[in-house]
Image: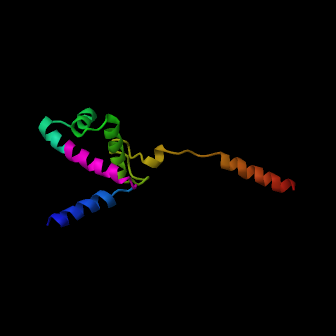
């Protein structure tokens, strides 16, 4: 039984991320999640990055790096609403803009072809 549970945990740790991360980062993410859960029960609130770092012997930057990397575990479709309170705004609505440079290049090539 321990072998099966270990294999399932390894699979979940290594294969369920949308963006592939280094293995040591994945291991730290697992440790931070477990420690955060247990500290939340003890403290009655979510632990701070400083508290997690002290508990695990990591720097605050190391904890924040893992927390940021954990956001890559799940991907979000660009047309999915950001939140319920945001009037249906999507990620695609918030990023990118119309690039007018393409029109300028098309116009320049067309003018060059017409004068040739």
Does residue 47 lie above or below 8 as drawn? above
Residue 66 in the image, given as x and y percentages of width and height: 33, 44
Q: Main secondary structure of the magenta part?
A: helix
Q: Quadrant of residue 37?
A: top left
Residue sitting at the far right: 116
Residue drawn where x is 55% and y is 44% of the image: 97
Does residue 35 lie above or below 54 as drawn? below
Residue drawn where x is 37% and y is 50% of the image: 72
Residue drawn where x is 49% and y is 44% of the image: 95
Does residue 114 lie above or below 35 as drawn? below
Residue 50 in the image, given as x and y percentages of width and height: 26, 32
Residue 51 in the image, given as x and y percentages of width and height: 23, 34
| Position of the C terminus by quadrant | bottom right
Does residue 78 lie above or below 37 as drawn? below
Side (left or right) of 96 relative to 70: right
| Position of the N terminus by quadrant | bottom left
Marks counted in the figure total: 0
Whether the magenta-drawn stretch holds residue 29 is answered as yes
* Residue extent of the magenta highlight: 19-36
Q: Quadrant of residue 23?
A: bottom left
Residue 12 in the image, given as x and y percentages of width and height: 27, 59
Residue sitting at the far left: 42
């Amino acid at each position: 039984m321990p072998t099966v549970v270990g294999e399932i945990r390894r699979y979940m740790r290594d294969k369920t991320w949308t963006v592939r991360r280094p293995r040591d980062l994945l291991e730290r993410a697992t440790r931070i999640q477990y420690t955060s859960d247990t500290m939340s029960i003890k403290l009655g609130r979510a632990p701070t990055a400083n508290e997690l770092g002290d508990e695990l012997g990591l720097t605050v930057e190391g904890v924040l790096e893992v927390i940021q990397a954990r956001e890559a575990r799940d991907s979000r479709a660009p047309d999915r609403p950001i939140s319920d309170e945001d009037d249906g705004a999507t990620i695609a609505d918030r990023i990118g803009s119309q690039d007018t440079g393409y029109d300028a290049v098309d116009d320049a090539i067309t003018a060059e072809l017409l004068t040739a």
